[in-house]
Image (cartoon, rainbow, N blue to C red):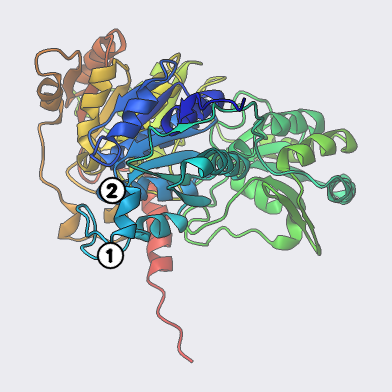
Amino acid sequence: MPDKASSTIGNYLAARLEQIGLKHYFAVPGDYNLVLLDELLSNKNLEMISCCNELNAGYAADGYARATGGPAAVCVTYSVGGLSLSNAIAGAYAEDLPVIAISGGPNTNSAAEYELLHHTLGKIDYDYVREIFARITAESVQITNPRDAPTQIDSAIKIALEKSKPVYLEVAANIAGSPISEPQKKRFSRGCVCDITALDAAVERAAEVLNEAARPVLVAGVQLRSSLATEAFHSLAHATNYAVAAMPNAKGFFGEAHPNYMGIYWGSVGSPGCGQIVASSDIGLYAGTTFTDYTTVGQSALINPAKMILARPDSVVMPGRTYNDVALADFLTALAPKLRPNDASIVAYRRIAEERPAPRQANADDPMTTRVLFDRVQRLLNHESAVIAETGDSWFNGLQLDLPSDARFEIQMQYGSIGWSVGATLGYALGSPERRVIALIGDGSFQMTAQEISTMIRYGVRPIIFLINNGGYTIEVEIHDGPYNVIKNWDYAALMSVFNATDGNGLGLKAATVGELDLAIGEASSHDGPALIEVSIDRDDCSKNLLEWGTYVARNNSRPPRTV
């Protein structure tokens, strides 16, 4: 007798999410996904995290994927939910995060009967949501036939993990509970499938170039994580004794206590001395790096391709040669034993390295400044810390923090969507509960997504959020100022009381002076729940690096159009 169906589409999907390592998924209900949510809830090994809106749920999934180094999932309703989610999914695509976006979909009979549906554009079109997601995911599918569901689900998850990109699964509302076979055993692999012949050739040539160099350097890039290559990069650095720098969006991917670590390579606004050593090197191995107008300071810090070996997630590009289908982790691992140790670049760096000036002594009644704030953040950090720095001045001040061994640091530099950090803090805290998340968020960004603080209270995560209140969008002020960069002030600390209502354990504190900040940090550190410290800063108090960076980015943005 043939096997009877022993699962449903929703059960099957939940089982696969559990198999690939998820313990939580983020959700916002709507009538098209309610049955699907029922089916997902039947898996008691997964916890549903109910968010305030779809955008925040997507940001939370982004943070969760960063925390675990693996996939994340978010489930919303059709069209109004999906399109609200789309900005966060576009960010996950830009940042190489395998987020599985799941949506309910119209009843399968609606298309056949040409029904005009609610939550839609008001015309007969059932494909537009999937088509929109096709531009911001690696795979976008509609599941309308139960027999095809296992294949479609498995294929989408496979693509998400191999490409480290989001995928979109739309499950018709009337089939989420349809019976199908239970999931069969399957192995999902991560990353590029390596061509051994191309790998060997790339390693041989790269070793030849690097061994002939006088002062080679290593530069860590953000795609080391999505390529599962951070450990291989560490091993390569240890074997070669080269000087090591990290791109700004790869801070924390290489141990900052390592004796060969120079700091952040970010052109003129990077760590003192680091940019000079990288620029003067005769060859650099750039592992998983990306070069945009932001990471190159408005295209002012461009590297000569003749002095670059660029190791991408699935290829290696060096002067005059390109090797395709070469997995980054495999390349770094195979290259390490082929290289002769060479400490010339780190010796040169130590000659010019500058001691960081000690912070100025501040009195308890002195008004708050960014320097004092980040000095206190520095003191908070330990090996279990994870810093989430929102787009803005928090980037520049956060990148100057010295991370203890094993501490983490996260920014969304490629996509740079302000408001990202609130949801990301929630997701990161759930994905890595052993860490104390320290979030650095400007007031303008916070106003975009503030309500997800209530979800942090609901699920008992315990980040410390430094809400930097300076009255506007500081990063935009330094690029191009105008009245639109000023925002309405809120009583941010008092919001914790609002979100607590009668059963919450959130803590809201204010600090306008140094003494108030020290007291607030002490109270927040011992609090068993989310704590928000509203720190009042003068509007013009920002990092000097932001001032310089903003000038270059503004110049790049304002280039006149070319004429024929």
Q: In this view of the protein, can residue 67 be seen by the observer?
A: no
How many C-alpha atoms fall within 10 Å of the one at disc 1: few (<14), some, or many (≥20)?
few
- Left or right position of 8 against 246: left
Where residue 391 appears, as percent x and y from the top left, is: 36, 44
Look at mark 1 in the image and give the residue it sits on.
Answer: 124
The CA span between labels 1 and 2 is: 21 Å
Q: Nearer the viewer, residue 116 or 454?
A: 116
Which quadrant of the rendered structure holds the N terminus?
Answer: top right
Q: Are marks 1 and 2 in contact (CB under 8 Å)?
A: no
Q: Amino acid at mark 1?
A: Ile
Q: Nearer the viewer, residue 20 or 491?
A: 20
Instruction: State whether residue 481 is above or below residue 283.
Output: below
Name which residue lies at 63% across and 42% down.
Answer: 162
Name which residue lies at 40% across and 55% down.
Answer: 130
Where residue 280 appears, as percent x and y from the top left, is: 70, 52
Q: Which numbered disc, 1 or 2, marks the residue that appears first in the sequence? A: 2
Q: Secondary structure at mark 2?
A: helix
Q: Nearer the viewer, residue 359 or 100?
A: 100
How many C-alpha atoms fall within 10 Å of the one at disc 2: few (<14), some, or many (≥20)?
some
Look at mark 2 in the image and give the residue it sits on.
Answer: 84
Q: Nearer the viewer, residue 442 or 226?
A: 226
Which residue extends farthest front? 1
